[in-house]
């Protein structure tokens, strides 16, 4: 049997992807699909950590644009990611996976506080770690969280699951003629202003040589395909 290309991964899930076509909240079928795919690669021995956003419940930048204090709005967004993390934990454990939710904001009743060495130990023991509450600081996105945690746990790759099949030169939802990129460098992403991840996260990945694979989460089996090294979505980085 072919071995996975990547041994340790960070899977970045946007909050919007968990809302499905509903556009808000948590769609049970999407959570179940993610849990099934993650459990599948976990059984194969892939060391897995998840970073989940909260845009399906609350977006800090949206609150800020309506006059709310930016830091307060961002903290609310961090709490939204914890809700999503607990939903993922429940779905994964129902499939027999051993999981830990680790929060950057202390909330001992429902999650462990994030400590880098403890997270690495959990992963080495075969547990799926779900990183919640972003970096614990306002003004930083969950994209930056994914890049930071990937560097900290020395992940081989970041798998960025979205609702579109890769990176395009314009919004494929609005422009049917949008061109998809198969490979990009991080400098391309920054210079072209492509909306892969924010500039802080992009620079962090570039500085630490962490490859990024952007792919469509909606298509079942894509997480496994990405882990196995199949050509899928868009690969960003020097090792593509």
Image: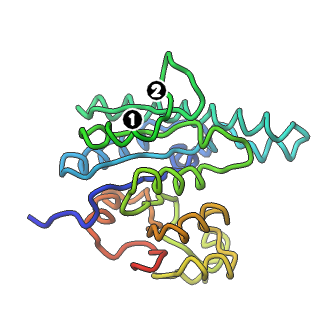
Q: Foreground: 174 or 222?
A: 222
Classed neighbour count for the residue bearing mark 2: other residues with Cα under 10 Å, few (<14), some (14–19), many (≥20): some
187 left or right, relative to 225:
right
Rendered location of residue 56, percent (x, y):
61, 42
**Disc 1 versus disc 2: distance between alpha carbons?**
10 Å
Q: Is residue 46 above or below residue 205?
A: above
Q: Nearer the viewer, residue 138 or 4?
A: 138
Please identify the quadrant where the C terminus is shown: bottom left
Q: Which residue is mark 2?
A: 112
Q: Which structural element holds mark 2? A: strand
Q: Which mark is residue 193?
A: none
**Along the horizontal axis of the image, is 187 left or right of 226?**
right
Tell me the crowding category of disc 1: few under 14, some 14 to 19, or many 20 or more residues within 10 angstroms, Cα based.
few
Disc 1 vs disc 2: Cβ atoms closer than 8 Å?
A: yes
Q: Residue at x 52, y 65 (%)?
A: 164
Which residue in the protein does label 1 denote? Answer: 118
């Amino acid at each position: 049997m072919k071995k996975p290309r990547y041994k340790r991964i960070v899977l970045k899930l946007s909050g919007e992807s968990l809302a499905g076509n509903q556009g808000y909240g948590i769609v049970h079928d999407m959570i179940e699909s993610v849990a099934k795919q993650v459990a599948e690669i976990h059984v194969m021995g892939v060391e897995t950590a998840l970073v989940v956003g909260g845009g399906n419940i609350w977006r800090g930048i949206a609150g800020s644009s309506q006059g709310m204090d930016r830091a307060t709005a961002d903290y609310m967004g961090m709490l939204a990611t914890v809700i999503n993390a607990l939903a993922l934990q429940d779905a994964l454990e129902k499939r027999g996976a051993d999981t830990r939710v680790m929060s950057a904001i202390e909330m001992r009743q429902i999650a462990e506080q994030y400590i880098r060495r403890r997270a690495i130990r959990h992963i080495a023991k075969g547990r799926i770690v779900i990183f919640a509450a972003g970096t614990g600081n306002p003004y930083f996105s969950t994209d930056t969280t994914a890049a930071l945690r990937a560097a900290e746990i020395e992940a081989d790759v970041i798998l960025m699951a979205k609702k579109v099949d890769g990176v395009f030169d314009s919004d494929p939802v609005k422009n049917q003629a949008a061109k998809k990129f198969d490979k990009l460098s991080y400098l391309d992403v920054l210079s072209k202003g492509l909306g892969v991840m924010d500039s802080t996260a992009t620079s962090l990945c570039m500085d630490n040589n962490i490859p990024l694979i952007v792919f469509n989460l909606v298509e079942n089996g894509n997480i496994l395909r990405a882990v196995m090294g199949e050509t899928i979505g868009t690969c960003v980085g020097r090792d593509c």
